[in-house]
Image: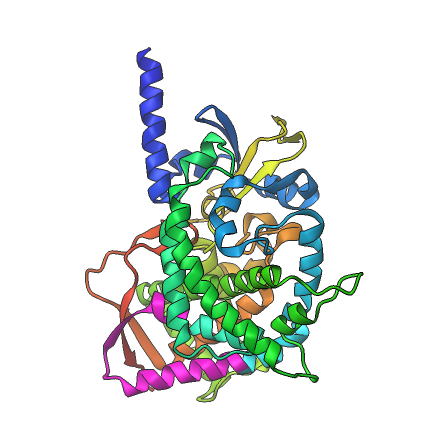
Amino acid sequence: MLSTLRKTRDMIRHLNLARDNMIAAWPKSYYRRELIVENILGRRMFIVNSPAGVQQVMVARADRYRKSPSNEQALRPLLGNGLFVSEGTLWQRQRRIVTPSTHISRLPGYAAEIATVCDTMTADWKRRPAGFEVDVTEEFTLLTAEIISRIMFGFPLGEKVHELFSAFAEYQASHGRVHTAELLGLPSWLPRLSGFRGRRAVRRFDRVLLEIMAAGHARQRTDFEDFLDLLLNFRDDQGQPMSPTLARDEMASIFLAGHETTAITLSWASWLLERHPAVEERLVAEARRVLGSRSPTIEDYPQLVYTRAVIEETLRLYPPVHVFSRQAVADDEIAGTKIPRGSFITISSWVLHRHTLFWDNPNEFDPERFVPPRADKVERFAYIPFGAGPRICLGKNLGLMEAVLLLAMSTRDWKLRLRENHPVEPLGRMTLRPRHGLPMRITPRGA
């Protein structure tokens, strides 16, 4: 009896910890183990924590797993039937439609737009007094939101970027936590309190998306199709266009994926560079050698080898998408352990990227891991900041290029320094953000 009560008490404590901050709930032992089986409120959960297990779930046997109900509950109110949520034939069709917008052939034009928008931000920095302070998480989020709107929708957001930022922050506050209802397996049609709180945020979000869509209908473009054009010009086998609701869902999906993760990565990278002066000095030297004083182009991207290594190491230590959840739709077996149909699978990139079996000194910031020849030794499925398999992030190449160019531009000419004694705590909810933000003083860097 006492043992049962103790287990119940420990489970409640664990759930409360996970609801507040998922990454704080992972026990230290998980960073040494490859497969963990837990019973949570009578439901079995398998934590897959090895490259072989990740490859099986996400790639080799991906058809035996679907996105979990908890993932759907967190994202569907905002993204509807967009790529992050849809399954089966709808997902396959929509992915085919979206793929051309992120093709490598588009990157040169995107690089030019990225540089232009970043130049606008740094021009604003020059007009402010030296040593002004901003929360770089917000600053970079506004920057990347403007970039994704221009390159994917052909729509300069201007002041509307603040409305989108605010609406998404409100949505994260209501839907970013792990919900006990999903762990209990309650049906998705039962109302959740968070649903009522998140609807206002979605309505605010939609006001801007609908304005962008209306602008897309009004323009007449013949020389180039951006992401919005692909949605609006689509016709199925019967000659029918995509429904406005589904087009809206895909717009919301690409907007979320296209700005949030890059902004968070830049924020964590700025903080890590301040804490590692030798790394920062080397990055600045590379940026100045490759770029001089001009804005970057796509030709500069392959030359920014160390800058990319800094971004990749930042993604290892602070992956914006810190957990992937799946549900088995067929029986399976992982590392000799039976996985019954209906079981829940969790893959934490936060844990996997810091696993003692697959990384040397896993908690140290060491960009050299991603510089050849050491980069060749990184196990493919021990590093999954963009996921893997059929559902790997379509914008991986764009996101990496954008993060590298923006970090090179902002660090080459500016010092970003955290407010003295400000607490820094990674908060794992919908994405991995700093709980208290990152207020940093921005000053011009000397020659």
* The residue positioned farthest toward the top in the image shown: 1
> Is residue 55 placed above or below 110 in the rendered structure?
above
Residue 287 in view (yes/no): yes
Residue 267 in sight from this viewpoint: no
Q: Residue furthest right?
A: 237
* Residue found 67% across the figure and 32% down from its top: 330
* Residue 6 highlighted magenta (yes or no): no
Q: Position of residue 260 (x, y in %)?
A: 45, 63
Q: Please give the name of the residue rendered at 44% of the width and 64% of the height, measured from the top-left corner.
A: 205
Q: Quadrant of the N terminus?
A: top left
> Looking at the image, which is closer to me, 391 or 284?
391
Query: Total label count?
Result: 0
Q: Quadrant of the C terminus?
A: bottom left
Colouring: rainbow
Judge left or right: residue 243 versus residue 432: right
Viewer-side residue, 381 vs 379: 381
Which span is picked out in magenta?
113-142
Rendered image quadrant of residue 123: bottom left
Q: Position of residue 278 (x, y in %)?
A: 36, 68
In this rendered view, identify the residue nearer to me: 169 or 198: 198
